[in-house]
Image (cartoon, rainbow, N blue to C red):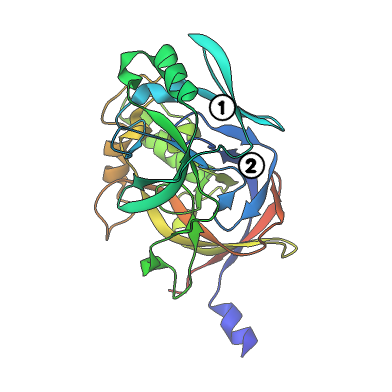
């Protein structure tokens, strides 16, 4: 029986070429060589976010200039930097203060507010458009569940990501998208427009849309690819300058490519959850076995 089952499952060997974390939602990411795999995502990913006076999340969708704020992690601090101001060190030690309720899309999460110094720094860096923003940290004792619709009866949780703990993209799909952009006279775009956590080298375009799982070659960890990632206007924002070179792109071209015929909108990459291997280390260069979904 096992041999028959294998005939219905196609496997491919692929390799991780890039790992990225985004400690503060919608600020610049950090490329790392390795990271600890946690159920809620890579270590320190989306642990903080910015909120407005109504405690609603604020991203590059509302404030593209957030793309110009750099983030670094030291042993003791989250460091924010921007050309307009001196860097700001935010202690990694949990802040003292009362929990507050903040919202990410339709989810309400418990969070700890960082000091008002962060709010003043953001205004100094970005100007009046940052007035009223504050930074909050996901509360350790709170769990934010991932939507159950795509989890095959399982469960998962995440911090301040849009909805899933991991976003996986492939080089093959970016190559195909850029070929389509160039054919239309548009400029190619870098992978950072899509803010992925895990970038996989794959010669085949859109292969990730057929993958069910990615398993580290020796079995250390396994990720399940759950749902195509619907893309928003953040993909139109240059992640270095916050400029919008071509307001409709790459969304227009992704819709034309119609990589998800049964779904509306522009899609790129796959949302994923961790099936096993919590606490293990994921590295650039790791070889993975991709297993496609049963037809």
Using the image as rendered, state which of residue 113 and residue 73 is in the foreground.
113
Q: Where residue 214 sits: x, y (%)?
A: 59, 61
29 sits left or right of 34 in the view: left
Q: Is the residue 260 above or below the residue 96 in the image? A: below
Query: Nearer the viewer's eye, disc 1 or disc 2?
Result: 1
Q: Position of residue 253 (x, y in %)?
A: 30, 38
Residue at 38% x, 21% y is: 65
Determine which quarter of the picture holds residue 50: top left
**Marked residue nearer the N-terminal end (1 or 2):** 2
Left or right relative to 221: residue 107: left
For image coordinates 46% across by 40% down, the residue present is: 174
Q: Residue at x 56, y 37 (%)?
A: 95
Dot 2, how many residues are within 10 Å of its Cα: few (below 14), some (14-19), or many (20+)?
some
Between 140 and 191, the one nearer to me in the picture: 140
Q: Residue at x 34, y 46 (%)?
A: 103
* Residue marked by disc 2: 17
Residue 238 in view of the camera: no
CA gap between label 1 and label 2 equals 21 Å
Up-down relation of residue 157 to residue 113 (above or below): below
Circle 1 packing at 10 Å, graded few (<14), some (14-19), many (20+), is many
Residue under pointer 1 = 71
Image label count:
2
Q: Element at badge 1?
A: strand
């Amino acid at each position: 029986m096992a041999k028959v089952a294998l005939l219905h499952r196609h496997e491919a060997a692929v390799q991780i070429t890039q790992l990225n974390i985004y400690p503060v939602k919608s600020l610049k990411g950090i490329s790392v060589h390795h990271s600890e795999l946690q159920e809620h995502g890579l270590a320190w990913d989306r642990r903080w976010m910015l909120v407005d006076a109504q405690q609603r999340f604020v991203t590059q969708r509302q404030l593209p200039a957030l793309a110009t704020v750099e983030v670094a992690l030291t042993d003791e601090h989250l460091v924010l930097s921007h050309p307009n101001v001196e860097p700001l060190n935010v202690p990694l030690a949990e802040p003292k203060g009362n929990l507050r309720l903040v919202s990410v899309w339709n989810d309400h999460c418990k969070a700890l507010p960082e000091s008002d110094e962060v709010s003043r720094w953001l205004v100094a860096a970005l100007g009046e458009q940052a007035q009223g923003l504050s930074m909050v940290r996901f509360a350790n004792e709170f769990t934010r569940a991932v939507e159950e619709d795509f989890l095959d009866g399982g469960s998962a949780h995440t911090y301040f990501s849009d909805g899933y703990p991991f976003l996986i993209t492939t080089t093959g799909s970016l190559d195909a998208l850029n070929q389509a952009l160039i054919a239309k006279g548009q400029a190619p775009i870098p992978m950072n427009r899509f803010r992925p956590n895990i970038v996989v080298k794959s010669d085949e375009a859109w292969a990730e849309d057929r993958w069910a799982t990615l398993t580290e070659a020796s079995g250390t960890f396994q990720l399940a690819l759950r749902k195509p990632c619907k893309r928003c206007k953040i993909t139109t924002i240059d992640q270095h300058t916050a400029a919008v070179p071509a307001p409709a792109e790459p969304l227009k071209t992704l819709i034309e490519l119609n990589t998800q015929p049964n779904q509306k909108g522009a899609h790129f990459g796959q949302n994923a959850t961790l099936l096993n291997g919590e606490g293990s280390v994921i590295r650039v260069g790791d070889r993975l076995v991709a297993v496609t979904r049963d037809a």
